[in-house]
Amino acid sequence: MNEKRKMRVATCSLAGCFGCHMSLLDIDEKLFDLLEMIEFDRTPFTDIKHCGPCDIGIVEGGVSNAENARVLKEFRDNCRILVAIGACAIDGNVPALRNNIDLWDCFQEVYLYEGGLEGNQIPNDPELPLPFDKVYPIYEVVKVDYFLPGCPPSADTIWKFLNDLIAGREPKVSYEMLRYD
Ligand code: SF4
């Protein structure tokens, strides 16, 4: 007997705080229902290192450095539907407050002038991803199919949104469910 194929879902946090992922986990016991309908690809919940072919990719956080951009492009290349979840992915949010400050001034303030640091120097190991001059919303780097606002979106909102997507419906969340804070 053919079992219905489960949707494959990947998630990632770029310049985010993992709060949107915590809100997803806040659906609590409905996680069991979710796992009846989907299987996870690369997410912070699994040990999969790279995003493979997926039905849905959920991206938290804006793009603040070269590694963020690499991961985001990998998601876009592999996910049929790409979702920007939370204010950071949608418009940069709080991390983008640094957009008004010169990056070099920022680094000097944090790594050279901050009290209590030993051997003050700006990190320069080539393994570290190069920061971008600004924090970018993800739509400025790749095409985005859906935006789910909130900082974070509530668990109920994420649940309703995912249910619609998984069922192949155009996602609809009520006015009461939409928030930007
Ligand atoms: S939108 Fe809010 S909760 Fe989500 S990653 Fe950004 S700061 Fe965290």
Image: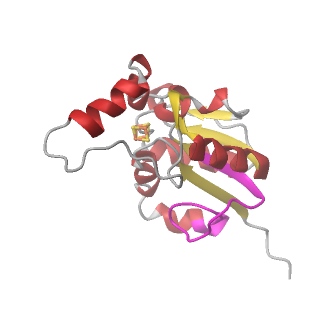
The count of marks equals 0
Residue sitting at the far right: 1
Residue, x 61% and y 47% (percent of image)?
Answer: 58
The x, y position of residue 71, in whole percent, is 64, 49
The x, y position of residue 9, in whole percent, is 66, 58
Of residue 176 and residue 6, the one placed in the foreground of this image is: 6
| Quadrant of the snapshot with the N terminus | bottom right
Instruction: Residue 147: tell me if it is visible.
Output: yes
Residue, x 49% and y 36% (percent of image)?
Answer: 86
> Relative to residue 177, is residue 17 depicted above or below?
below
> Relative to residue 160, is residue 144 depicted above or below?
above
Residue sitting at the far bottom: 1
Of residue 146 and residue 132, the one placed in the foreground of this image is: 132
The x, y position of residue 168, in whole percent, is 76, 47
* Displayed-image quarter of ligand 1: top left
Q: Is residue 93 left or right of residue 113?
A: right
Q: Is residue 143 left or right of residue 84?
A: right
Of residue 111 and residue 60, the one placed in the foreground of this image is: 111
The stretch in magenta equals 35-58
Residue 30 lies in magenta, yes or no?
A: no
Instruction: Residue 180: tell me if it is visible.
Output: no
Residue sitting at the far front: 119
Q: How are the residues colored?
A: secondary structure
The x, y position of residue 33, in whole percent, is 56, 65
| Quadrant of the snapshot with the C terminus | top left
> Relative to residue 70, is residue 180 depicted above or below?
above
